Amino acid sequence: MISSATVALVGLGMWALSPQVSSTGAGPHRDGVASWFSHDSRASGNVASAAYGASTPSPVKPASPLDTMILPTFRATDKGTLVMDQQTRLDVERIHALFPRDEALAKLDSQSVGLPSQAQRDLKALYQQYSQYAQAVAQTFPPGLSNGTLEEATQQLKGLHELRQQYFGAEGAETLFGEEEKTSQELLELMRKQADPKLSLEDKAEQAQAEWKKRQPPAQP
């Protein structure tokens, strides 16, 4: 577990700016899972209300918001292998975060049933790699050890980069995490430029995020 400010840095573009949900009830997790829920256009826009179809009463409520979650669609290349990119990694990351191992593997099976056999094997292998990596992150950055400094955030990002290379290889780490790491480095640079000594690391991270968002090109229609 890394510091809250570093979490905000590491995944700004993918999950730090999204509502965060945990399947276990143990607290928030670093993912944009709220975007997976089915949204009823007549509902108020609240994730929980949309997930349960609050605007249209149902005789039976789902046991969990996860029951109405829209699972990702995995893709294969023209050679029959799994498409490896940041989106694929995020989808595997979310399933790993939300479901126990056996259920997660079952979800991956159901979502890859139409893929070539090699792509299905690639997906399971990626899940195994990610599970090992996530365990290493938890062991390397245990809770309660953060001192809340920019230097520590820099070192933690460096440590994450090294762990990713260890578990996914240099090329795989770049393919799966490269864009995210580039954003993190940009945010760190923005934080270093903030001279006010009274700002906490969290305050600097928040301001850096706001500045970073302003600098992004407008979304294409």
Image (cartoon, rainbow, N blue to C red):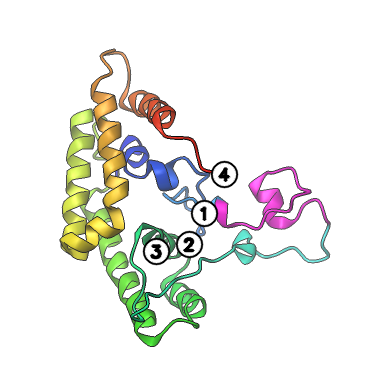
First of labels 4, 2 by sequence position: 2
Residue 175's disc number: none
Position of 175 relative to 161 (above/below): below
Q: Callout 4: helix, strand or loop? A: loop
Q: Mark 2 to mark 3: distance in Å?
A: 16 Å
First of labels 1, 4 by sequence position: 1
**Tag in front: 2 or 3:** 3
Q: Which residue position holds label 1?
A: 33
Bounds of the magenta segment:
35-56
Question: Does the magenta run of residues contain 6?
Answer: no
Q: Residue at horizontal 17%, vertical 59%?
A: 165
Residue 58, x across and y down, in percent: 82, 62
Q: Residue at horizontal 36%, vertical 74%?
A: 82
Q: Which residue position holds label 4?
A: 221
Image check: 34 left or right of 208?
A: right
First of labels 1, 2 by sequence position: 1
Q: Mark 1 to mark 4: distance in Å?
A: 23 Å
Q: Badge 1 local density, few (<14 within 10 Å), some, or many (20+)?
A: many
Position of 69 relative to 127 (above/below): above
